[in-house]
Amino acid sequence: MKLIKTIKNMKNLIFLLLSISVLITLSSCGANYAVTENYNLNNTQVQLSNANFNIVDKISGSSNASYVFFIGGLGEHQLYENAYSRMMSKADLTKGSRAVCNVLTEEQVEGFIPFYWTRTVTVSANVIEFTK
């Protein structure tokens, strides 16, 4: 009788541990933050106090990398460079006097660190065209 109770307790314990491990495996953790610093270091100064421009387009570019046990993927700087170049390829600055402004960089990390996670960097901006 005591052996049967022990076996039932072991089955309950195994079921509980399996349930917890399945919940941990299927749950997703994520973090997101936006960087508003000027990584571009543009020295062009434009006075936007007058209504001499129109917002033509909103553009964005993304880049992501996956990591397993801290191995793989790209570095943070390379992710930013890839996302920025993808965004700028959509800008079409050759039509008239246009400029890119309000550049915002966002980074999102999803997964179950340290086992597996994905880092996504998205850069977005407004394209303005000067009228005067």
Image (cartoon, helix red, strand yellow):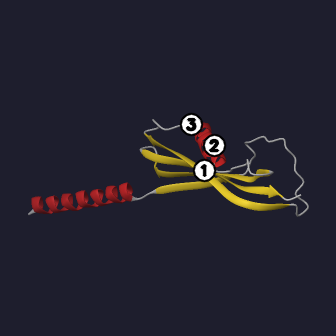
Can you name the residue that lies furthest to the front here? 95
Quarter of the figure that contains the C terminus: bottom right
Disc 2 and disc 1 in contact, CB within 8 angstroms = yes
Of discs 3 and 2, which sits in the foreground?
Answer: 2
Image marks 3 and 2: residues in contact by CB distance under 8 Å? no
Q: Position of residue 29 (x, y in %)?
A: 48, 56
Q: Secondary structure at mark 2?
A: helix
Label 2, residues with CA under 10 Å away: few <14, some 14-19, many ≥20: some
Q: Earlier in the sequence, mark 1 or mark 3?
A: 1
Residue at 48% of width from left, 47% of height from top? 118
Q: Quadrant of residue 59?
A: bottom right
Q: Looking at the picture, which amino acid does disc 2 mark?
A: Ser
102 with respect to 10 (left or right): right
Describe residue 50's horizontal placement relative to residue 18 as left or right.
right
Residue 25, placed above or below residue 42: below
Neighbourhood count class around disc 1 (C-alpha, 10 Å): few under 14, some 14–19, many 20 upward: many
Nearer to us in this view, 126 or 29: 126
Do the CB atoms of the residues marked 1 and 3 lie less than 8 Å apart? Answer: no
> How many other residues sit within 10 Å of disc 3, few (<14), some (14-19) or many (≥20)?
few
Per the image, the residue denoted by label 3 is 75
Mark on residue 94? none
Query: In what element is the residue under mark 1?
Result: strand
Residue 33 vs residue 63, the one in the foreground: 63
| CA distance separating discs 3 and 2 | 16 Å
The residue at which mark 1 appears reads as: 61
The quadrant of the image that shows the N terminus is bottom left
Please tell me whether residue 55 is drawn above or below residue 87 in the rendered image: below
Location of mark 2 (residue): 85
